[in-house]
Image: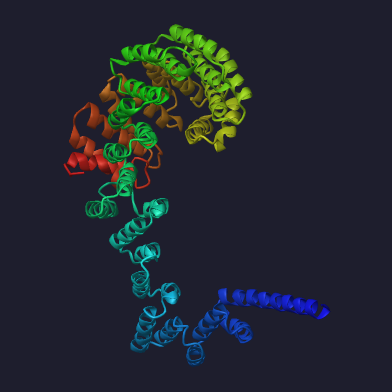
Amino acid sequence: MKKYILFLVLLASHFGYAQNDYLLGENYFRGGEYEKATTVFKKLYDNSPFNTTYLQRLITCYQETNQFVRAEELLKTKIQSNPSQVFLYVYLGYNYERQQQKETATVYYEKALSEIDKKSNYSGIIAAIFKNYSLLDYAITAYEKAMANNPKANYNFQIAQIYAEKGAFKKMFQSYIELIDKNPDYLKNVQRYASRYLTEDPEDKNNILFRKTLLRKSASNPKDVWNLLLSWLFAQQKEYGKAFIQERALYQRNPENLSQVFLLGKIAFENADYDAASQIFTFVNDEASLQEEKFEANLFLVHISIKTKSDQTENLFRTLFTAFGKNEATIKLQVLYADYLTFQKNNAPKAIEVLKEALDFSNSKFDKARIKLKLGEVLVFTGKNNKALIYFSQVQTQLKNHPLAQKATFKVAQTSYFKGDFTWAKAQLKILKSATTQLIANDAVDLFLTITDNEPVDSIPSGLTAYAKAELLAFQKKDQEAVDVLKNILENFKGQPIEDEALFKQATLFVKLQAFENAIVNFKKIIQGNPEGILRDDAHYALAELYHNQLNNPEKASEHYQKIIFDFASSIYLVDARKKFRELRGDTL
C-alpha cells in the first residue's frame, strides 16, 4: 500500500513538473524565443513522445530556427513508427513548403488527403492542421472528403468559416445553409455568424448573395427553416412587409402560435414602418383566438392610428372600449387614451378624469405606476410641475430599479430641467446612464449633454434657461410660443454653443407649423456654420426628409441624402439615407 501511495505521489510530481515546463515553453514560444522553447519542448517530447501538442510545438520551433532537416528526420521517424498517424504527412509537407520545395510539399499534402478515405477518423485533425497553416483549400477538401465518407459528419460550419477567411462569401453562405439543412438546430448560430457579413442595406452585395442562396435552396428543397431565415433577413433589412409574407406562410402551415408574427409587428412599429405593422396586427387580430392576443394587437393598432394622425382614432378608442370594457384588463388602453386626449386633443382635464378613474380599477402596483407616470406628464402639460414631481417620486420610491422607476427618474430630471433646476436634473440623469432600458439611457445622455454643454459658467447667462422654457412650451404643444422664445435665444446668444441647438429645435417647430421656408433657412445655417458641429448630419437628413415628404422635391432630397452618404460615413442616418437615395434614383429595391 505504501509503495502504491509513493507511486501516486511521484506520478503527480511528474505531471506537475511537466505542466510547469510546458507553461515555460509556451511563454518562450509566444515571445518568439524559439531556441529556448526548442530546449523545453525537446525535453517534454522525449518524456512524452505520444503527446501531439509537444510534437507540433517542437516541429515549429525547428522550422522557426531553420532546423528543417531535424524536423524532417523527426517526422519521418515518427511516421515509420506510427504509420496510422496520417496527419503527420501535413506537418512533413509544410516542412518542405517552408523550404520553398512546393512540389514535394504538395506530394505529402495529397498523400494526407488520400489517407482520409482509409482512415476517416483523422479527417477532422488533418483539416484543422491545414487550416492552422492557412492552407485553406486543402482544409476545405479534407472536410468535404470527411463528409463524403461519413454522411452523419457535418463540417459545414468549419467550411463556412474558411470561406469567410478567403472572402468567398457566396460559398460561405452556401455552407451555412447546408449546415442548417443537415441540422436545423444550428439556425441561431448561423444567424449570429452570418449577421457579421450582412448589413441593413438590401442592395448590399452580401445581402443579395445570401437572399439568392436562400431562395434557390427554398425552391429545390422547401422547408420551414428557409422561411424563418428569409423573415430574419428581411427584418435585418427593415423590410418588414416582406418578412411578414414569410411569417404568414409559416403560420398558415402551422397555425398554432402567433407570437413570432406579433413580435415582427412590434419590431416594425418600433422602426416606424406603420404600414407593415398595421397589416401584421390586423392579421393577428383576425387570427387570434384569445381575447388577450386580440386586445394587444388592437392596442398597437390604436398606437399606429395616433402616429399616423388618422381621423378615425377617436372612433377606434370608442370601439375598443365597447369591445373590451373599462376595467383592470384595459388599463394600458385607458392610459393611452389619456395621452391622446392631452397631446393630440389638448383636453388635459378629460385626461385627468380618465386616469383617476383608471386608478380605481388598478390593483397591480405596476399598473398604478403607469397611471401615475401619465398623470405626471399631463400635469407637466398643464404647468403643474410640483404636483407632477410628487407622482413621479412616488413611482421612483415604490418600484426601485424597475424600468418604470427609471422612467420616473428621467421624468423627474426632465421636469426639473423645465423648471430651470439644472443641478438636480443632472444628479438624476447621472443615475440613468446605466439604465437597463436603452431608450431611457439614450434620452438621459442627450439631456445630460444639453445641460452640461450649455449651462452657465461663473453666473454668465448661456441661454439654457430660455432653451429649457422653449422645450417645455414645445412639450405643451405651444409651438408658436416656443418659436418666439428660441428667436430671442438666437438674437441674444449668437455664436454660443446653444445656437445650433436653438436653430435645430426652432426648425423642427417650423416644420410642424408648416413654415417650411423658415425651417430650410435654419437647417442651412447649421450646415454652413461650424464645420465641426455635431448637428450637421441631422440638418442634412431633416432637409432631405422635408424636401422628400412635404415639398415634393426629389432632386433636392437626393442632394441631401447623398451628402450624408459621402460626407458622414458614421452618421446614424447613413443606412436610411442610402436606401431613400436609391429609391429616388429609381433603383429597383
State which quadrant residue 133 falls in: bottom left
State which quadrant residue 399 falls in: top right
Position of the C terminus by quadrant: top left
x and y percent of residue 21 in the render? 66, 78
State which quadrant residue 312 falls in: top left
Q: Nearer the viewer, residue 122 or 314?
A: 122
Residue found at the far left of this picture:
586
The residue located at (80%, 79%) in the rendering is 6
Q: Is residue 403 above or below residue 79?
A: above
The residue located at (19%, 32%) in the rendering is 553
Q: Is residue 274 left or right of residue 485?
A: left
Residue 529 appears in the figure = no
Position of the N terminus by quadrant: bottom right
Tell me how many marks there are: 0
x and y percent of residue 112 in the render? 39, 82
The residue located at (56%, 33%) in the rendering is 432
